[in-house]
Amino acid sequence: MFAPERLVRVALVGRLVAQRPPDRSQQVAEGPLHRVGDVREVGLVERGLGHHRRLERARAAIGVGLPLRGEAEQRRHDLAEALALGERPDPDTDHLVRPVPERVGRPRRHPQVRARFDRPLAPVHRERRAPGEHLEPLLDARVDMCGRPLGPRPEDHLGTLPPVGELADGDPRDRVVDGPWRVAPVGVGIAHGTITGGDGMWISSTARRHPSRRPGVVPRNPLTPCPRRRRMARELPTPPEAGLVNALRFGTQTFRFLEGVQSRFEDAVSIPVAGGGSLVLVTNPSLVHDALSRPEDFPRVPAQGPSSMISEQGLVQSEGDLWRQQREVMGDAFAGPAVRSYGDTVGRRVEELTDEWRTALSGGDGPTTAADGGTAAAPTGGRRADPVSGELSLNLHREMTSMTFRVACEAILGETVGRGLADRFYEWMAVAGEEFEFDATTAAPEWLPTPVSAEFDDAANGVLTLAETMIERRRRQLADGTHDSMDMLTLLLLREDDPEVDYPPNQIRDEVATFLIAGHETTALSLSYTQSLLAWHPEIRARVREEVREVVGDETPAYEHYADLEYTGQVYAEALRLYPPAWAVFRRTTEPVELGDYRVPADAGVIMPQWSIHRDERYFDRPDEFDPSRWDDRRPEAVEAYFPFSVGPHACIGRQFALTGARMALAGIVREFDVDVPAHGLDDLRATPTLRPGDGVPSTVRFAE
């Protein structure tokens, strides 16, 4: 009889099957060391080993029964069953083990293992046992589910342990358990032996006990599976050129630089800049979605410098609780009935615009329109009619800005403005575009002084004055009961006295100023680029006209036509892919964070460019080709690499406004007119917070056939 404490503790790799020799007389003395490796089996060592290597026969109390196909879930179930039965190893029985997984190549040896013990093992005999018996010996192999050693047995420790069930000093997750037998789930680990992971395992009855855990202490729940090991984050790659050179190229040749980075780096790249910071350009749309879904890790860039002179905490700049509050307050102004009203407003305004073009082409001076606060003749805005050729020369971007600004004021703010104020606002935005244009100082440190031109100061004051005028007028209207539409400005003012709403100083003014700009600018830009593309592809324009005349006929375009203008919507979606007005999403980091497999440093500017991702051949076939048919069989919002309105919690709140208004505007213009743009019309695109044409979009308008 051999006492249980003389048993060789065994840690297993993979799924195990125990062996029992049929006849004890056939057994031979075992050495102190056994090996389990690739296709080898634990067994009785050959005869002829020296007496100095002989030990008494090992009591390998490991049962039979783990199925060869068993997985971790089955092993955990079987372990729980064995524990419930209270089974223990039989000290009178010898059982041997072989691992199931078969690996190619020699197993790695632990340094403590001497080469002279590397001997072939004798074959073993296999025997099946009754259900529930195969885990008996595992109760004595002291490893957890991850194969991590649990330390020596309590009886091997010379000190005293706390009472059973009480916490041991140190790790609060540890507890003391009763008895010498411990749960030993199948895994990789050691008890009284020394092993190697992977291809082989060494078991030594005389090896030094593992010191990694205190004696007598086991994990709170040894059946808990080992968590999946996380891949260590790596540093972002950097372009081969010097950091300062790349920063200058980003500021002066922005779109060319983005396309070069997109073609060379699959996921992201870090560009060192002056002052110790970095610019991180994300080129993988999956990482873009990941970053934009985590605003706490990748917050917005706060308003600073010239931009803070117009708005500091509007909806497009705010974060956290303030952003959530404002989104909830203004949400109803951008959903449901508001979208229908917006579409109808665009239809009426585009009809007014085409009436002006029709009058100018017919030799008239154009209608007189109501300006803000009075009546004035509408300025021509640079229109020049040629009665000989029957063409009207104009700045397409200016025309689209005037129309969309008046729409935004009416539909979002509940204010009616005239063409004169709309043209003035266009001039303010042209000045702001010059002020915000990227240049060699774009990637400069924040502490570097940023001078502001007198022209921009005047423009910023004009926007703020207009916002304050609208707010005061609405307050009077609400007090008199003369205004009943639930537009965004009204919703903001009605919640001023709500105890659950906390407006910082100038919050309503910031929101109005923000939407005076954001409510019209991107729509005006996208309509200008869409009509430029239609001018360069007359066959597509003809198909749009055919659809519009069939769906709308001679009526004013309205929201009811939206769903049937399907091909027109595809044209607009494709134009947004090639010329996204919001050409990049800008974020920052305040502390080191992980993005995919990469580590993004603190205080980095993070840029996620729609411009280059939308043109990447990895995600779009023939990416430089204007092809609305690519959206025949798929919805744009289902394409991960397509995000003209951004994604995540901070995605554009006016997305549906833009999609609806664009179909109405294109329908009203293309139905009656051919707008022609020269091939070089978009050669001078400028990188500002939006994608702006340098000197407008020169165009000629003539009646369609």
Image: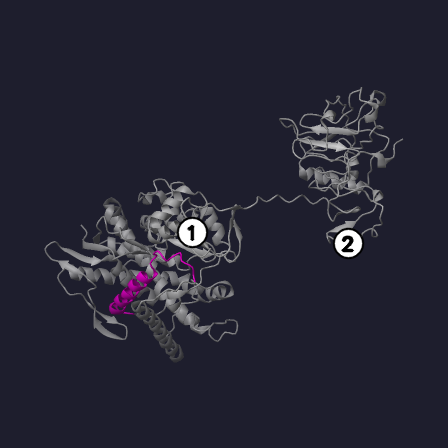
The label on residue 676 is none
Q: Which secondary structure type mostly characterizes the magenta part of the structure?
A: helix
Residue at mark 2 to residue at mark 1: CA–CA distance = 50 Å
Query: Circle 2 sits in a helix, a strand or a loop, which is it?
Result: loop
Residue 66: x, y in percent?
Answer: 72, 33
Residue 309: name its quadrant.
bottom left
Q: Residue furthest left?
A: 388
Q: Amino acid at mark 1?
A: Met
Q: At which x and y percent is residue 651?
A: 44, 57
Q: Nearer the viewer, residue 552 or 146?
A: 146
Q: How far across and down, in percent of the image, does residue 611 sit?
A: 36, 49
Whether residue 520 is situated above or below residue 262 in the rendered picture? below
Stretch in magenta: 417-446
Counting the numbered discs, the total is 2
Q: Please give the name of the residue rendered at 44% of the width and 42% of the height, measured from the top-left corner.
A: 266
Is residue 97 something that shows in the picture? no
Amino acid type at image mark 2? Asp
* Location of mark 2 (residue): 169
Q: Is residue 114 left or right of residue 449?
A: right
Q: Is residue 537 left or right of residue 501?
A: left
Q: Nearer the viewer, residue 175 or 522?
A: 175
Determine which quarter of the picture holds residue 653: bottom left
Instruction: Tell me the residue that label 1 is attached to.
Output: 608
Viewer-side residue, 575 vs 487:
575
Q: Is residue 505 left or right of residue 456?
A: right
* Helix, strand or loop at mark 1: strand
Q: Nearer the viewer, residue 242 or 621?
A: 242
